[in-house]
Amino acid sequence: MTREGDNGPRGQDAPCYDAAGMAPPSAQGSPPSTSAFTARRLGALAFVLVTAAAVGLRLSHLTADSLWLDEGGSLQQSAGDNIWATLVYLARTTEGDHYQPLYFLLLHLWRTVAGSSVLALRVLSVLFSLAALAVVTITAARVYGRRHALITAMLVALSAFFVLHAQEARPYALLMFVGALLLLLFIRVREARLDRPYPAAAWAFWVWFGVGAFASVTICIMAGGLALGDAIVARHPRRWMRTWLPCAVAALPALGFYLLSSTAMDPRSAGVTQSSGPLLRNAAFAIYGIVAGTTFGPPIEQLHGSNAAGLVLDYWPSLLLLAAATAVGLAAVIRNIGCGDLSDDERGVSRTLLFALLASYVLMYVFAAATHLNWQPRHSYFLALPLFLLLPLTVRCGHDKRRRLCQGLGWTALIVLALANVYSLGHYYWDDAYDRDDYRGVARYVLADDDPDQRSVLLFGYPVLLRYYGDRETIDGTGVPTGRLAETVRSLTDEAPRVLLLSNREWAFWDRSETIPEAMSADYRFEGSVRFSYFTLYRFSLR
């Protein structure tokens, strides 16, 4: 496959020829020059430094924060007595994790070897994230060359989106790896299918897609976008059908598994957070979270309050700068695909990736609308892969007189985006306002209260996480009828004189106009509340 040179874009390092048409000695097979050797060593050193930075960022503060709400789901979904029991549980559950079972099966196996400490649970995602970084870098080098690959690796290494999901016991780091390898295999198929209908890479591509379909139903959305991009660019129906029809066959086992759930006929009944606002807002939030991480702007927890709009406006300078850098970067990518310094192969892959990015974004919009899913950036992880592969094209301008200006704008956009991610990581690591559900702090608070006449009840959240942190006394009150809250709490606590209600992410579960203290007022006297990240603890005494 034709690619740019190892030390720069295609066309910048081509050997010169003398009047007789002979190449200079270095182009005729003589040992490389000292400058070329030094450049290669510096390039290798740069890759080592980028890798070290990626490892350090993904391991830093790995166990500092409590396991949060969704990680409680991972604990529960992977807690079967054996792999078969775990698979049966995943097949029958009505939770949204039914549609991404592979991670929980792997986590179950991992826990039997590494244990269930916070470090053990999260380091598996670190390994998947580093594998995704390696595959994306290899893909960039294969298509565009080493300089482009180095820029891509730097962007992914610093990406707050990649780092955040590398540090949680959830499927998204695995999904990024699955998607990255699927993309690399597709590019290899695209290269080889010109020579023979079913190259060896195609079989690997189909098998891996079958595996990926078990990783998440959203892998099918990624593949759908990639197939549409391939159809638009390749314009060869027979070749396209030979590539993509076997994918439909490979997805059948996963499709059969997904249909086992009782939610298959009504996706909105799945146990996932349902959208409560405009879908366009979620669509914009997905791009924002992928480009700079969800900790770049205001803390998400505060956006569920009544002053959400005003809070966003308080961040308008940084958000406007981020939007401008993103717009300039994407505009430069589109321009340079059309008239930049690209080979025919590079341009073909770039156009396919661009159309795949747009198509999969539209498909995700349709999916979110159909399922009423509260669309978060993590659900669109597959958009990050083509995006980070394409962004270095901002500096691949053509040879016209505006080249220097275009490159300047491109580099400015890339630097701003990189700094935005560093800023976002600063919030993520060191600003308590950006912490997620503090089950560890809540459990310690409950355990430290030695009042023998008080009972605690968890209204919303994962009881398994309180038990994980040693609180085995709190009563599981999840699913209680909110219309008869006081009566139900009296029954659950055997009319204990004092009650502590633990409410996790109340904004997502409490659907009544009255507050919890108001709902309890018939039988209980409200005595105050305590706040933890994503938690409110209400203290009551029996009237």
Image (cartoon, helix red, strand yellow):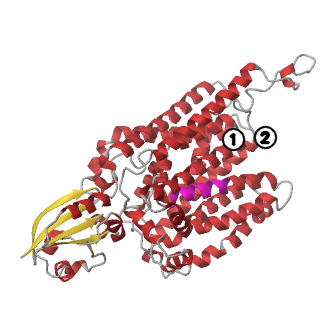
Residue 173 magenta-highlighted: yes
Task: Identify the residue under disc 2.
Answer: 2
Across and down, in percent, residue 140 comes to 66, 43
Q: Which residues are magenta?
A: 171-183
| Tag 1 secondary structure | helix
* Image mark count: 2
Residue 541 magenta-highlighted: no
Q: Quadrant of the N terminus?
A: top right
Q: Are marks 1 and 2 in contact (CB under 8 Å)?
A: no
Residue at figure coordinates x 81%, y 56% from the top left: 193
Q: Quadrant of the C terminus?
A: bottom left
Residue type, mark 1 in image: Ala
Residue at figure coordinates x 77%, y 57% from the top left: 201
Figure quadrant of residue 252: bottom right
Across and down, in percent, residue 229 comes to 66, 56
Residue at figure coordinates x 16%, y 74% from the top left: 519
Task: Identify the residue under disc 1.
Answer: 141
Comparing labels 1 and 2, the label whose residue is closer to the camera: 1
Q: Which mark is residue 374?
A: none
Observer-nearest residue: 324 or 273?
273
